[in-house]
Image (cartoon, rainbow, N blue to C red):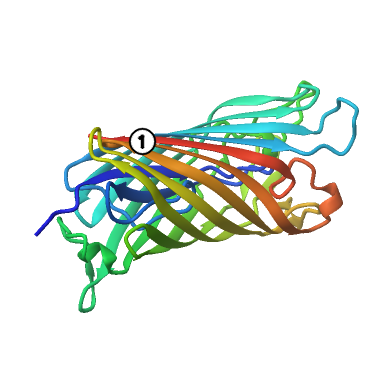
């Protein structure tokens, strides 16, 4: 039986708007043959038993501005995420992520940069093969045509600075590096190969936040997030020498954000629903992977939308870059 030789990758979602919503980890797998992985949506992959995965992701958000004047409108957010994963068993993987964020306003009156809250996550891999069962250590190409699933969950630790203040001493939770309290996340994925080159992926997740009291006595609870993603990947090129593969990707990302609550009162100009489209590509070189994409909002239904400058759904676009290597 021909074994499927994989190069496992981890792509990270760091969709963090001016209101400091948390980035989400996502998982993917691809090799010279078999299923592909999106640039951003989560695919149903676990790490090989006893292996390590090092990852890096950049999510650069560029925001539309309301006025031509150079003022304190949100200009850009750059989120770097450093990750390390370990395959405990063929069906169980554990991950730790360390984000570094850079948030800028147009006139540079209040920028912030630094390490944000550390995130810990566990993943359980399942498949259908005469019933639902744990992912085995080795699978043939025929086995990879079965439905594959993951269940994942995790939390953040309040390691980032939550009490950042501007030059006047005012704390802006949206510019802070941390939430001050743990947040919690859960999700599931489904992946199916459709023929020798095409892969379909579904991914849904939820993130919940707790209320935090800042050093000035103010209270903030960020709105919960719910995501539903669908992605299609097509294998475009393979070369056995050097184990090179290039995939084309097209993803749709739906995001629903709850309203933020400041001092136990719902805040205006926060929350809403939006749909992004992300065309991109992923290239594999042996056990390493590089993914690139451009994410654009194509539909929004935001609360008090005309006031939400610098928030998710109000971007010109987001440049997404992911890199990973298995060892």
- On screen, 30 above or below 302? above
Residue identified by numbered label 1: 324
- On screen, 81 above or below 265? above
Please tell me which residue lies in front, 202 or 118: 202
Where is residue 127 shown, x and y percent of the image?
Answer: 27, 67
What residue appears at the point 44 percent right and 59 percent down from the top-left corner? 186
What residue appears at the point 34 percent right and 61 percent down from the top-left corner? 150
- On screen, 250 above or below 230? above
Please tell me which residue lies in front, 155 or 95: 95
Where is residue 182 shown, x and y percent of the image?
Answer: 50, 47
Where is residue 17 shown, x and y percent of the image?
Answer: 66, 43
Quadrant showing the N terminus = bottom left
Left or right? Give the position of 324 relative to 296: left
Q: Secondary structure at mark 1?
A: strand
What residue appears at the point 25 percent right and 33 percent down from the top-left corner? 242
Left or right? Give the position of 70 relative to 42: right
Q: Is residue 18 visible?
A: no
Location of residue 276 (image quadrant) = bottom right
Left or right? Give the position of 61 relative to 280: right
Q: Is residue 246 visible?
A: yes
Q: Residues within 10 Å of mark 1 (few under 14, many from 20)?
A: many
In the image, farthest residue toward the bottom = 130
Please tell me which residue lies in front, 222 or 163: 222
Location of residue 238 (image quadrant) = top left
């Amino acid at each position: 039986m021909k074994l499927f030789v994989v190069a496992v990758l981890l792509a990270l979602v760091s969709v963090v708007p001016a209101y400091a919503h948390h980035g989400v980890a996502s998982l993917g797998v691809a090799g010279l043959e078999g299923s592909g992985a999106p640039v951003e949506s989560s695919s149903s992959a676990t790490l090989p038993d006893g292996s390590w995965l090092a990852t890096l992701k950049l999510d650069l958000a560029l925001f539309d501005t309301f006025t031509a004047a150079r003022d304190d409108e949100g200009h850009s957010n750059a989120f770097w995420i450093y990750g390390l994963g370990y395959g405990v068993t063929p069906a169980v993987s554990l991950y730790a992520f360390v984000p570094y964020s850079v948030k800028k306003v147009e006139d540079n009156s209040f920028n912030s940069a630094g390490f944000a809250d550390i995130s810990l996550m566990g993943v359980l891999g399942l498949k259908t093969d005469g019933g639902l069962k744990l992912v085995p250590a080795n699978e043939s190409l025929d086995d990879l045509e079965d439905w594959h699933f993951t269940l994942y969950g995790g939390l953040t630790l309040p390691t980032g600075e939550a009490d950042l203040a501007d030059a006047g001493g005012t704390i802006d939770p949206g510019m802070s590096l941390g939430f001050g309290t743990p947040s919690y996340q859960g999700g599931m994925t489904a992946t199916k190969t459709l023929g020798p080159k095409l892969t379909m992926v579904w991914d849904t997740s939820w993130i919940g936040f707790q209320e935090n009291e800042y050093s000035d006595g103010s209270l903030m609870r960020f709105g919960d997030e719910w995501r539903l993603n669908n992605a299609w990947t097509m294998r475009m090129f393979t070369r056995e020498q050097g184990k090179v593969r290039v995939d084309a990707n097209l993803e749709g990302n739906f995001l629903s954000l709850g309203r933020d609550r400041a001092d136990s009162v719902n805040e205006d100009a926060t929350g809403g629903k939006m749909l992004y489209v992300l065309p991109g590509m992923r290239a594999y070189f042996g056990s390493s992977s590089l993914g690139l994409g451009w994410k654009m909002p194509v539909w929004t239904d935001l609360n008090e939308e005309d006031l939400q400058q610098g928030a998710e759904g109000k971007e010109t676009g987001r440049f997404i870059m992911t890199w990973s290597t298995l060892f």
